[in-house]
Image (spheres, helix red, strand yellow):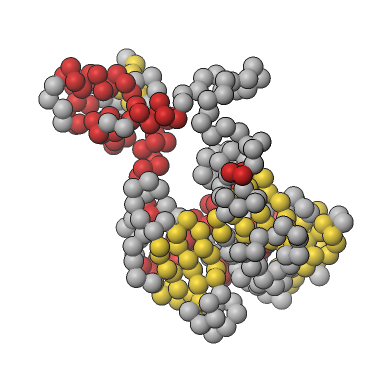
Amino acid sequence: MTDSDATDSTGPDSAASDPAASDPTGSDSADADELIAERLLPDEAFELVAHETRFRILVALNEADEPLSFGEVRERVGVDDPGQFNYHLGKLTDRFVRNDDDGYQLAAPGWRLVGAVLSGGYTKALESEPIETGVPCSFCDGEMELRFEDEKIEMECRECEETYTNIPIPAGIFEDVAPEDAAKVVDSWLKRLHASADYGFCPNCDGRLDRTVRLQDDEDAPVDFEADDEAFAHYDCGRCGFGWYSSFPSAVVLHPALVGFHFENGVDVRTTPFWDLDGLEPGATTVESRDPLRVAVPVTIDGATTVFTFDADLELVEQRRN
């Protein structure tokens, strides 16, 4: 399995079941040593933008190329009553909208809110018949197929039913994408997911993300995740509880050492789909040591093999030619 991801936000490894996890409401007061100076309660934030006119204001400002005057915003939103419009615009100002000498424009929270809606994470669902990808299965002579179900996408072999990935994906990433390009879009989105994790940020809430290496025979290993290697990666956010599991090669392929090795051999990892990267075949990962944990990933390109060894925190500890 080249890459396999599964969401587990309510299982034994999720922060959702951890009483020590931070309060998701954000209602606790800011500590003196925190960088956050002020918090707006989630219910207050959603109440501010719940009205149709207010969200249309955010969309209008998002589509504008420059700050707008009060009259320009009102005209674009289409509200005849200046007093009513001023009331709704005032509710957004200083939170989601900035107003200065140049006019009205979106503040950073406004950009993020509009962006989240446009991504389709709140408003869209995936609806399509299964799509033939042309991607060969790593285990048989079959072909991978994309299947859509609400917010989730599954890439699976039609012959042996081997799963490449099964994870929630915002429907908006497929906007204006031809069916024959859908598999590459999934590949790019998965790389973005792993890149965010490599920097320690949750792709769901921007909280701090923990990365750990797990072994198939761990007592608390997930029963609903089957990897083809003895070791796999586990990602878990302590803020929102979002988490997933990934095959080990997929978890480390964006490491600078592997990216550089591929690039020196004429392969750009950014544009080459995971399934076209030679030397990352399923089952190739080896656990060289358990205490301390050492996991080796051999990568072979044009007959030359380099072994990359990682520790329990997915940090590279050794790189050697085989």
* Of the pair 56 and 183, the residue shown nearer to us: 56
Residue 18 quadrant: top right
State the residue in front, 215 or 178. 215
Which image quadrant: the N terminus?
Answer: bottom right
Vertical relation: 275 (above or below) 195: below
Where does the image place residue 174, in percent across and percent down from the top left? 37, 57
- The quarter in which the C terminus is drawn is bottom right
| Above or below: residue 149 compared with residue 62 | below
- Look at 65% across and 67% down and name the residue there: 227
Residue 205 visible in the snapshot: yes
Q: Residue at x 50, y 23 (%)?
A: 39
Left or right: residue 217 compared with residue 282 = right
**Looking at the rendering, which quadrant does residue 206 occupy?**
top right
- The residue positioned 39% from the left and 58% from the top of the image is 150
Residue 94's quadrant in the figure? top left
In the rendered image, the residue lying farthest to the top is 101
Out of 130 and 150, give the one closest to the viewer.
150
Q: Residue at x 35, y 45 (%)?
A: 118
Number of numbered discs present?
Answer: 0
Q: Residue furthest bottom?
A: 141
Compared across the picture, whether 217 is left or right of 264 comes to: right
Query: Can you give x and y, in whole percent of width and height, for residue 126 in the image?
Result: 36, 59
Residue located farthest toward the right when viewing the structure as drawn: 291
Q: Is residue 200 visible?
A: no
Q: Is residue 275 above or below residue 264?
A: below
Q: Position of residue 152 (x, y in %)?
A: 45, 59
The picture places residue 85, in percent across and down from the top left corner, at 20, 22
